[in-house]
Image (cartoon, helix red, strand yellow):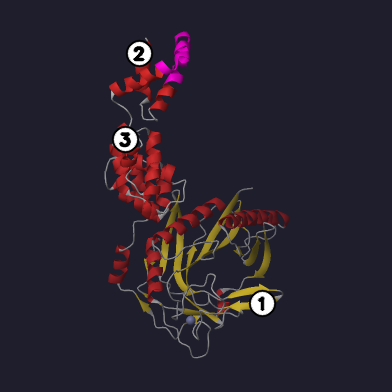
Amino acid sequence: MKITPIIGLEVHVELKTQSKMFCGCSADHFHVEANTHTCPVCLGLPGALPVPNKTACEWCVKLGLALGCSINEQSFFERKNYFYPDLAKGYQITQLQKPFAINGKLTIDDHEIRINRAHMEEDTGKSVHVDGSTLLDFNRSGVPLVEIVSEPDIQSAKEAKKYLNKLQQIIRYIGISDADIEKGSMRCEPTVNVCIDDQFYTPLVEIKNVASLTGVMNAIDFEINRQVKQFEEDRQQKNSSNKTTRGWDADKNQTFLQREKEGSADYRYFPEPDIPPIIFSKEKIEEIQKNLPKLPGVKISEYKMLGLSDYDANLLAEDKDFSEIFDKIISLDNSNEFAKFSANLLLGPLKIIEIEIEKINPEYFKKLFDKKSELSSTVIKQLILDSYQSGLDPLEIAQKQNLFQISDTGALEKLAKEVIETNPKAVEDYHKNPLAIGFLVGRLMKVSRGSANPQSGKEILEKLLK
Ligand SMILES: [Zn+2]
């Protein structure tokens, strides 16, 4: 049996604007006392009029452009009507026919995932279940939300994860949201069905309540297996078009039937009469495009051009602040050798501690690079860490602690003589077995406090012992 999973992702991202989508209330609702950030507009009181948040609309366009979408010069909002306790107005303001952004794409390992749209809408309130009753908190009601809908081009749970990671990275790079799945500022609903033997399609399922990246992967895998099993059980259901909604139970690691899905007609969409169409002129769109920061994909290929490995390039580009500091460092010297040297320090000794980016001094990388022939690689790693922690010039630290390698043969010879005089037993051992030189080199490193070049030290000891 040939099984081809067909996976699409609907992703909701909360924008981190100061105020909500259609009113002046603070959009911050995380760990805030319930119902303190509300007003007649976001509580849906009669007669209250919505005013669109200009920044939110621009950010939605910004994301659309970063995803390679076309931007509709004229867009409008629509009402999606449904009843739910956390939806005070009885409808959600969203975009259906004319969203801000359409027809984009994200490329995952050379596989193109088409993006159908990125549209603007508002979040709902939150139901909180306490001791058998349900309480409502409207702080989240009306928070700007962008929905990014992919075409069903994703072929595995692993690819879905990569898509989400990449989307998250782009969103953070352009600074419009924290896109934190655990905190709920990024939410994901996979749609899954399976094509069997290139001719049968299992019914489409939309999965809700997935609250982590691992959850997304597990839910998709579970659903693929469940649908294939179901198909084997009742072979008669060919090319079924019934779409159902299933919830994800993370504890049991399985999906469960929630409801037969309403078609879009059931929502009785119609244009929002209180908000005029939104116009983005060609000039305005170009301006937003021009101000987009360099995106991670571009940075990764630039880093690889500098001779860095695919792995290192990805790690450096992963976080915007981190890649910005790397860019600052490598702007001081355009050699590939310096890029590799700095990447090793950033991804080695510094990456393993919780670093504060602003405490990193790019100059120190350059200083150490210029003196690298006089310092051992272990010492360089220690110096970058010490200078980060103390803020002091690494070369000054090296000077104070006598860490420069002794390249002066005279000085080295003096230390070597001292080692030979104070270790007669080891000298005796050496004359029986030349391999015992290792011990004497070790002593020499110790008396020079690590600053002797081990190779020249060994040569000098051998010369003296002969
Ligand atoms: Zn409000």
Q: Secondary structure at mark 1?
A: strand
Q: CA distance from mark 3 to mark 2?
A: 28 Å
CB contact under 8 Å: marks 1 and 3: no
In the image, taking residue 167 as reference, residue 306 lies left or right, namely left
Q: Earlier in the sequence, mark 2 or mark 1?
A: 1
Q: Which residue is mark 2?
A: 464
The x and y percentages for residue 97 are: 45, 74
Q: Nearer the viewer, residue 31 or 454?
A: 454
Q: Type of residue at label 1?
A: Thr
Q: Residues within 10 Å of mark 1 (few under 14, many from 20)?
A: few
Task: Report the magenta residues as a range.
Answer: 421-440
Q: Which residue is mark 3?
A: 372
Q: Type of residue at label 2?
A: Leu
The x and y percentages for residue 95 are: 46, 75
Q: Which residue is mark 1?
A: 134
In the image, taking residue 14 as reference, residue 386 lies left or right, namely left
Can you tell which quarter of the image residue 422 is in? top left
For residue 336, say whether it is visible: no
Residue 96's place in the image compared with 176, above or below, is below
> In front: mark 3 or mark 2?
2
Can you tell which quarter of the image residue 77 is in? bottom left
Q: Nearer the viewer, residue 385 or 140?
A: 385
Q: Residues within 10 Å of mark 3 (few under 14, many from 20)?
A: some
Q: Type of residue at label 3?
A: Lys
The x and y percentages for residue 160 are: 53, 55
Q: Residues within 10 Å of mark 2 (few under 14, many from 20)?
A: few
In the image, taking residue 362 as reference, residue 385 lies left or right, namely right
Q: Is residue 434 magenta?
A: yes
Name the magenta segment's main secondary structure. Answer: helix
Q: Nearer the viewer, residue 426 or 365?
A: 426
Residue closest to the far bottom: 47
Q: Secondary structure at mark 2?
A: helix
